[in-house]
Amino acid sequence: SHTHYHYPYECKYLTGGISTGFLNCFNIDTKRHKIIKGPKQAQFGYTVQQHLAAGGEKWLLVGAPYEMNGPYQTGDVYKCSLSKRINGNGCSKLNLGRISLTNVSERKDKMRLGMTLTSNSKDNSFVACGPLWSYECGSSYYSTGICSRVNASFKFSRTIAPAFQRCETYMDIVIVLDGSNSIYPWYEVQAFLINILQKFYIGPGMFFTSIVHEFKLSDYRSVEEVVKKARSINQRGGEETNTALGINIARSQAFRHGGRRGAKKVMIVITDGESHDSADLQQAIENSEKEGITRYAIAVLGYYNRRGINPEAFLKEIKDIASDPDDKHFFNVTDESALKDIVDALGERIFSLEGTSENGTAFGLQMSQAGFSAHNVEDGTLVGAVGAYDWNGAVLKETRQGKVIPPKMSYAQEFPEELKNHGAYLGYTVTSVVSARNGRLLVAGAPRFNHTGKVIIFTLKNSGNLTILHSLKGHQIGSYYGSEIAPVDIDGDGITDNLLVAAPMFFSGGLEKGKVYIYRLTELVGNRFIHEGALEILNGGQNSRFGSALAPVPDLNGDSFNDLVVGAPLEDDHKGAIYVFFSQHNRILRKYKQRIAAGDLASGLQYFGRSIHGAMDMNGDGLVDLAVGSLGAAVLLWSQSVIRIYTSVRFEPSKVNIFVKDCQRGGKDVTCMSAIVCFNITARTVVPPTQEIGIKYNVSIMERRFNPRAIMDNPSLLQPQNLTLLPGQETCEHIYFHVMETTDYARPIVFAVQVGLQNPDKEPILDEGWPTVVKTELPFWNGCDEDDHCTPDLALQSMTDLQTQNQFCAHHVQSQGAFCRHQGDGDPAGGSLRVIEGSRRRMVVDVWLQNKGENAYHAQLNITHTPNLRLSSLFVKVLFKKLYLRCSDTQSDDGDEMSTADNFNDIYYILKYEADLLFTRLLQNLGYYPVKDLQLSIEIPEMTKNGNQLLQISDFYIDQVSFASLCLSIFFFDLKFKILELVASASVELPSFSAMFLHEDRPVRHLRWSMVLRDRKDQQHSL
């Protein structure tokens, strides 16, 4: 028997008989799902990530970048349990917005924490970013962005802030103030102290000290509080100025025990006289220099001027205390009241200590918004910084060893300075691909580059060396090409096969349809990505933003190729939809397999598909599930198991023997048969081995005729039948039928089985590429040996009823003709000459086909012939000199012909046609065939018997329009006669090469005309 499989073009299920219903392909369940709702005003659902906690429990992480933490809109990340009920929706905030950097004046309001969320499958940690996190430097706020790494147990692990730099005013300042009696008036010194303190940003950990009195500025939250405390400082008095002692105490106590790590150390020394411990001064200065303390020294000359003392030695001592160069670090004032004149100059010099760093990145990264995107790599985290370098953007990295900040010039090749004002937004998204030859390569998108977008492929070493290897460019202005990027490993070998680049604002037909470009990595052309095609959705007249989210997912349908899910959050009037694409043989199929619209799941969903993640089994059935974000909700979609139903049919007996009538049906002797139909369910994806699966099947015999050759014994089996099977279990059913007496035993009987699921809404899904209809052929026994191999022996004979020359001439009438009188010359054609009588219009071909061996099935008789025969009735239509027929037989069964020598019979004749002419005064063809090349000769006398000129033929013409006629114009000369008798003779003749023949060789006919002259006058006559 031969079996044929019929594959469905769409997902189908049986509804009765052989009719089918249709499902929304394919195996993402839209009937059963889980919707986790959260606050819309917090943008709950902006990002989603599946998370496996340390204890093996599965959670859904949901970003809410507008979430409130106390009075501030910091944003946060929710962890949502699938089993526990927490606060009604199973979710609780992780309070990541409360995490702070030490010794930094942060501004967390509107930091958008949770806008970026990415997980690390290796250690089950995740990174959440707030790209608008900022901090205060003096009166400015810098939005450098911040990320937090959280471990598998939801514990904060570390801060990731590669763009953060300490403020230029990040310094510990110690003021060594001379409080001896020579300082006068003291309130002028207090006023100076207050003015200089008001120039400072007072933050955690700063110190203010005098020799006998000190307090931590970290005890106070504002400049006002510190100034208030400074107003209470009283003059201590004393007769000695111990400057070296003051410097040493400030250095050893203030800086060593209270100083902040990484802060610039600044000391301001104010005194009005030479020190009494000058012997210790030089050592104190050298120790300060070794510890990196920058010293500003202010000499107050009031005491010297009031007493007229030369201050030269005093000024030299103060200059020694000041750091080099003196013109930046040394001040002198005429008296205490002049201190207020140097406040501004001192402040400017102090605050310009650090300036811009050597590699030129300090100012360029201050508004970088690092964390707009993030991607985990082996040794750290890659972070996109869209605001760096005047919004041209950058890619930064943070490892456990520190920050990796590429120099600005690293990007100059692909992002030239002349396009700087376009704001490329490099780092809008970051990811990586894996090359077979060169390992991991980094990828970053810049959707606003030159208004059309760009993607760069590059390497980044931890030394900061960034090398751009290749770039891809968008083509449409405003399409946001490169705003989403995703690598796809189709066959799961760890090597990237495709790079997807989305342009979600791609315009088509005046609408934001969106487009996803597909690139293939080729190792042969230096790790370049070659454009291979695109994914687009023909969704009619609506905006879509197809490609706003790209989520490569593991194999969903069990074909061993990984798949893809794409978000289109603006579809259906901003309700949103997602599209599932399958892959086959290292190629993403261009037509989506399943569209899941928000309206298919629940009412009220908006922007469904703004974020997607699918990496693990969330409900414990062993199948990868999808998490999809929308406005104020996160949706979990469950995958369904995919199965195949294997159907096989065998017959008992294996062939129909119409000579064996072993039962009766309806009073007739028939051949009884049985079909054994077996079903076996094989799981393409995970199916619990104990899960019972209900299937439907129906059988039919495909006989499209009024009197079928085979009939089911039990007609009720034509209706759908139910079965319940376990995966891997085979179940067989016996179907009984009978075969009627028939002469059509060459064509096999076709037995069809159609299968489906009893309840497609609850059962696993049928593999859409697997056949649902199996057709098996039941052949008839061919009557040959047991090996079913027939050996026929066909023999062919053929002849016609055309007459030979002898047969033709045997008739009395024909024997008197010239053709037969020449019979003694023999047959010039060597026996192949045949005569066509003039009245014959048809010929008969007799063919005898005989089989001397075993049965010959599908035998055919082929006859070829010359164009002068018409097969419908072998009607002769054209005159040919020859006739040729070839008769042959073929047979296309499994048998071999015993001998083919007698399978061909050629009929080859030379033909002669009998002409049937009526030749009297008229010449007429009474026969069927046209007579060509006939020569007509006419003789008319011009002279009388006496030699006189009688007539002259003046003209003649032949008319063959209606019938053949010859007209002569004759001119008679002047002759005297009463009666003129004119006798002419005519003959016809055929050339020797003609296929026709006449009964006479050259028949002659005589024509007579008589003329009676009525007018006796002399005159000429014409006829």
Image: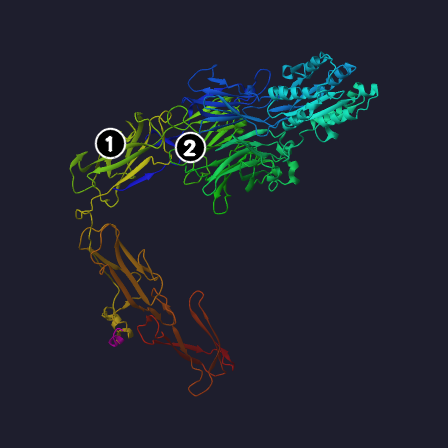
Q: Nearer the viewer, residue 949 or 704?
A: 704
Quadrant of the frame with the N terminus: top left
In the depicted structure, whether residue 883 falls above or below residue 590: below
77 w.r.t. 1019: above or below: above
- Report which quarter residue 793 is drawn in: bottom left
Which residue range is magenta in the image?
Answer: 822-827
The image quadrant of residue 929 is: bottom left
Q: Is residue 124 magenta?
A: no
Q: Amino acid at mark 1?
A: Cys
Residue at 30%, 27% in the rendered image: 689
Q: Secondary structure at mark 2?
A: loop
Front residue of 799 and 315 = 315
Q: Is residue 875 above or below residue 155?
A: below
Left or right, 753 with reference to 438? left
Q: Does residue 214 appear in this view?
A: yes
The front one of 616 and 550 is 616
Task: Determine which residue is flagged by label 1.
Answer: 732
Q: Position of residue 849 (x, y in %)?
A: 22, 56
Query: Residue 541 appears at what percent x and percent y?
Result: 54, 33
Magenta-drawn stretch, dominant element (helix, strand or loop): helix
Q: Nearer the viewer, residue 978 or 193?
A: 193
Residue holding disc 2 = 554
